[in-house]
Amino acid sequence: MSVYITTEPANRIVDGITPDWIHPHLIQSTDPIKGRQFRVSGPIPKGACLLVDRPYAIIPVDENPDNLICSYPACNRPARNPERNPCPNACLPDVIWCSSTCRVADQVRHGFECTWLKRYAGPIRSKWSEYDFGMLWVIVRLLAMRHSQLHKLSAASGDASVQQLKHGWEGIDSLCGSSDTWSHDKVRLWSTLVKKYLQSSSAFPHDMGIDRVLHLICQEEANSFGLYPRETGHFPVPKPPVDRGEQYAAAVYPTAAIANHSCSPNIIHKADEKGRMVFTASRDIFPGEECCISYFDLTQYNDLKSRRDHLRKSFLFVCQCQRCVSEEPVEEETEWDALPMMESL
Ligand SMILES: [Zn+2]
Ligand SMILES: [Zn+2]
Ligand SMILES: [Zn+2]
């Protein structure tokens, strides 16, 4: 049994956060090398749902209008119906609501991002890249969500609902990732983008300094999820292999971000129709075992070298999962042994 199992109540994995569903046996613990991780305190049968986590910020990344999602965080459903509503201020075609009800309910949150989108989306997309735009928009939506929660908080008359309204930001605050996680080139680029586009101004007022916003990018880049139409992480890879499909959104989840990677994961993950990240046990899991997801599509990288190459480039760590270690060639020292072990996500 692991000595790292905590005694925290399972439904309060991070203070102030309650995901929509968390299995009573799923707990957060800390590993001296990997940092935060999920473990189970009791047996979990294959097929059990372990976690349903609402996104704190989500953006569509697919230009196909059929794949746009409702911008209202309490909804986030696909918005392909004829009643869907665009923004009256025409800030961005990607911003859509599935109904006028959702649009009206989302006024405070969207109001925070609307002027920013109208002013900067075009210039950022043409001067930088679609990726950079998506990254900055996720940051703006993180701040917009926090803004709308603080707004509701000040409107609420101090009661039990206050705790509910705080959902999530503590989880965003505690995400791993810092400027030390990333290369100097990347941090320099992000620093430029923050100064140019994310500083507090009359059009984009917020209470965070440049350094805190830069830190938020370092956290977001280490923790965001892609959303795909099919599951990620089936292992062994089915034959013939079925990939997870084209990415349609990107999101940050306060609790799901705790999961570490394995190339032979015991959890599959996929977002549901409301954009919530769902973790499902892909085999029986025994008490004390760590619960891992796969950070990439296992059908795309098969052999040890391609998996470790991909993880090192995209996630900056050398994978030491059971599968990778078991596939290492015996005796001869590999080039990986010479690299320092990096903390995983
Ligand atoms: Zn909606
Ligand atoms: Zn707008
Ligand atoms: Zn691995």
Image: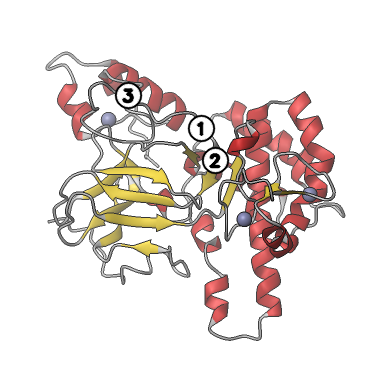
Determine contact: label 1, label 2, CB under 8 Å. Answer: yes
Residue type for callout 1: Gln
Label 3 SS: loop
Q: Quadrant of the N terminus?
A: bottom left
Q: Which mark is residue 299?
A: 3
**At 76% from the left edge and 31% from the top edge, which residue is drawn?**
124
Q: Is residue 188 visible?
A: no
* Residue for badge 1: 247
Residue type for callout 3: Thr
Q: Quadrant of the C terminus?
A: top left
Image spot of residue 335 (x, y percent): 29, 16
Number of residues whose C-alpha sits closer than 10 Å to that of mark 2, classed few (under 14), some (14–19) or many (20 or more): many
Q: Could you tell whether 39 is left or right of 301 in the image? A: left
Q: Is residue 10 visible?
A: yes
- Nearest to the observer: residue 286 or residue 340: 286
Residue type for callout 2: Ala
**At 18% from the left edge and 50% from the top edge, which residue is drawn?**
289
Q: Which mark is residue 14?
A: none
Label 1 SS: loop
Image spot of residue 68 (x, y percent): 62, 41
Determine contact: label 2, label 3, CB under 8 Å. Answer: no
* Residue for badge 2: 250
